[in-house]
Image (cartoon, helix red, strand yellow):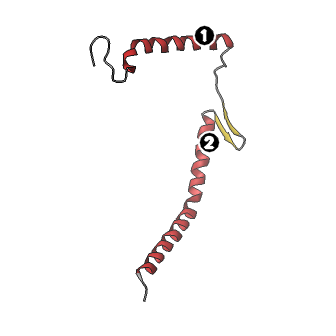
Amino acid sequence: MATISDWIGVIVIGALIYAIVTGVRHSNEAKEAVRQKKEELKAAGIDISTEGISLRSNRTAMDRDSYIQKTQEQLKQGGAYLYEHSNSMSFGKKAEDGAA
């Protein structure tokens, strides 16, 4: 007579076999979907291969001066933002104007 653990084992083994068979059946569909997505990305300028990813762009790299200028602008903007919201970092302390 089969016990409950025997039936549980049969169900688990059956589920594993079903999962393997289903995976094998759908593996070709998955490969085709990956191939299609690679083609779409390649058309958009992104090439994925075993050697890595290469991006195609029509923008040129920034030169040193423009990089420094952009960095300084962002630092100024960040400093201004922090100054405007300086009381938001009080962590429970009362603000200078009396608001909580």
Judging by the rendered image, the residue that carries numbered circle 1 is 69
- Is residue 36 something one can see in this rendering? yes
10 left or right of 63? left
95 left or right of 8? left
Q: Quadrant of residue 56?
A: top right
Residue at mark 2 to residue at mark 1: CA–CA distance: 38 Å
SS at mark 1?
A: helix
Name the residue at 40% across, 15% down. 86
- In front of the other: 73 or 27: 73
Judging by the rendered image, the residue that carries numbered circle 2 is 39
Q: Against 62, is 10 above or below?
A: below
Label disc, if present, on residue 55 of the rendered structure = none
| Spot occupied by residue 27 in the image (x, y as percentages of width and height) | 58, 59
Name the residue at 68% across, 14% down. 63
Q: Quadrant of residue 59?
A: top right
| Spot occupied by residue 68 in the image (x, y as percentages of width and height) | 63, 12
| Spot occupied by residue 49 in the image (x, y as percentages of width and height) | 69, 42
